[in-house]
Image (spheres, rainbow, N blue to C red):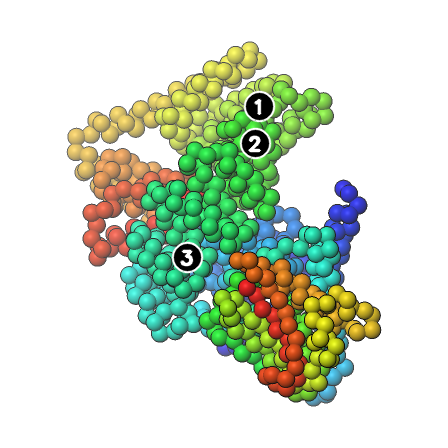
Amino acid sequence: MPEDSLFETVLASTVHDMKNSLGLLLARLEDITLQLEREHSLNSPVSALRYEAGRINTLLMQLLSLYKLDRNQLTVHPVEVDLIEFVEDCIAAHAAVAEQSGIALEQDCDEELLGFFDPDLVGIAINNILGNSIRYSRSRVLLAVRPRDDGLEFTVADDGEGYPQAMIENQGQYARRIDSSSGSTGLGLFFSDTVARLHRRGGRDGRISLDNGEPLGGGRFRLSLP
Amino acid sequence: MHDLLTSQSILIIDDFAAFRGTLKTMLHRLGAQQIDQASNGSEAINLCRQTDYDLIFCDYNLGEGQDGQQILEELHQRSIIRRGALFLMVTAETGSAQVMGAIEYRPDSYLTKPFTGDQLGQRLKRLLHKNRALADIHQAVNAGDTERALALCDALAERQPKLRLSALRIKSELLEQTGRAEAAEALYDSVLSRQPLLWAAVGKARLAFERGDVEGALQQFIHIRDHYPKQVSVLDWIARCQQQLGREEEAEQTLRDALEVSPKSLQRQARFARLAQQLGHDADAHRAWARTLQEGRFSCMVEPAHFAGYYRAASAIAGELAGREKRRLLSDGELAFKELTRKYRDNPTARAGCLADAAEFFSRGGNRDRAAQAVGKLAEALQDPACRLDEEKSEALAAQLDQLGDDPALAKSVEKARAGVSALQQRLQQERADIEGIADRPAAARQVNREGMALAKTRDLPGALEKFRRAVRLNPDNPNYRLNAAQIILESHQLKTDPSSIEEARAYLARGFDGLAPDDPRWKRYQTLLGRLPRPY
């Protein structure tokens, strides 16, 4: 077995094991949270733990995908996706954390909307952005999906300070923004951008864009797929 | 949510005990009370036989043995999953589970690990509400009342736009099952005019294939592949069309591509092996047959013809191998021999269908003792009155025995096997003569049918089947006997998993029903039985 593919196998199976452990960790944290709630005590330290464990999971998936991307092995598996299910999944993943941080999570998606994309990859991307929005918003975060130009547009918006001006001005150069000081925000955008571009259809590519203001007054992230 | 889950019986299939525990806790918290667990496919299938589960959670990747998709397909093919039961596939990584399976057997939902109790609750709420809205339809289908089910589908699609596509999808299946191809096609067209949905596109193309427009079907499937790349069952269809059109080399390549995406399918390996063998690609054929048998260890779908194909391919390459490779070939052949004698211990027809090829392989490979043993077992199988090879197969067997007889070491056992073939042919002749000698065949058929009904009441299914077979031979035009024979096969756990019995049931249902009026109760029975037949291919 060549060394590269050996490493890839090791990486994939390690990530697999870590995900299993994280799954159990998350479940135990859920147990503890519920127990604390029953005993009427506050649970903010546990909620922080849950948030971090969830984040590690997303980052791991992102890491594995980016490794595959680097080796030209990241393939998109587009399938039919029930958008309302997809949106509710993303919302439910962050519901506990949002509630404990006092953030209202809102969704806007037509019940009948069907899409055609890779729900795993797009899910990692949206979950990452959603997690950051919850961290930076004041009181509200919105996840919306609408049909647009024969494709789909996902929006994650909040009522926080908005994206820094420099970030909005340098859109498209996400790779350059990845450094240890900016946390994972840069990496999350780079990943979303990559996932969007990998969804190619009928000569058109997916893309992401950032701006501030509409619809909640804070930052707005949009991911469109052809 | 609590109310919805309390009464549901639930099965969790996962090889990882800690995960089963976690999921169980989550479900308890959501109100579930009856939860069983299994760690692999055979455990799961046994449990499903005993309990009619409402909700099944199945991990896709179960390590050694069947994967989640194979379990789902087996549950359908053995008809041990009720229509309306929910099957949720749990997957671990971003990946390909969704493109692997047959489009006809999709899980109701996919869950990606790890998920929280909130996510699980949300998903279940949606699915259970939807399922409740479809409950009347499922009930009508399960009761065999197709007309009512169709009317309910229309009403639901009209009343609840959210469930329109689910209702139409069920409707299309029912229309196809009951032979209303034109109505089904119109339905697919109307769905496709709004959205290019995979199931509708495949349905339309499948109908083209079935009415003989193979070239048109091929074009449609290729178009679907361009939109839905890697969808393996679409590749299978493309290969099937190519093969039908005599383009074997292309079909072989298409199947090679499909196997690269999804090598775990026994039937795909077998189709590829057969094609490769036909094209003289012996090494490829041998590899694919070996993989077929390997997957067959955990599956109900392995056939005697697969063992026969394996031994023919192994014989073809035996001469080119030497040393370690040859020893390996021979020891693999031994393993397959053990497997087939174990698997077909109670099935002389199946044993007779592959032992001659095994004997030839061992004889060519220089293992005389094993070759003699195989021929001996073949003779035994042929002498068994339950052995049911037809005229054509018995002739082919006789020719094979002539060849084997050239090996002096086998002469004695070949003689016995020849006697077995004669005995078999005599039985066949007897069956024909039996009928020819009877003056009033319809009356005799009625009598035999009555005897069969009596045996069926005592649950002597093999005995009853024997009677109904005879009734069909005596009066091939009477639909009652055909229905009875097919029903016995499709109701017996043992028979309905045996491919040759399924073919027999299919043959019973293939003719004799055109004259029935739609309000004839036999028409309903006929449709129910048709619906229980697994899809060919």
Residue B285, numbered label: 2
Judged from this view, the residue extending furthest toward the left is B440
Chain letter for mark 2, please: B
Q: Rate crowding at label 3 as few (under 14), some (14 to 19) or many (20 or more) other CA atoms within 10 Å.
A: many
Judged from this view, the residue extending furthest toward the front is A169
Mark 1 secondary-structure assignment = helix
Q: Rate crowding at label 2 as few (under 14), some (14 to 19) or many (20 or more) other CA atoms within 10 Å.
A: many
Mark 3 secondary-structure assignment = helix
B182 left or right, relative to B532: left
The residue that appears at 59% across and 83% down in the rendered structure is A215
The residue that appears at 55% across and 44% down in the rendered structure is B258
The residue that appears at 31% across and 52% down in the rendered structure is B181
Residue B244, numbered label: none
Which residue is denoted by mark 1 in the rendering?
B316
Mark 2 secondary-structure assignment = helix
Judging depth in this view, the residue of B484 and A54 nearest the camera is A54
Q: Are marks 1 and 2 in contact (CB under 8 Å)?
A: yes
The residue that appears at 46% across and 71% down in the rendered structure is A112
Q: Residues under labels 1 and 3: Cα distance?
A: 43 Å
Which residue is denoted by mark 3 in the rendering?
B200
Percent across and percent down for residue B19 are 66, 63
Judging depth in this view, the residue of B433 and A191 nearest the camera is A191
Q: Which one is earlier in the sequence, the residue at label 1 or at label 2?
A: 2
Chain letter for mark 3, please: B
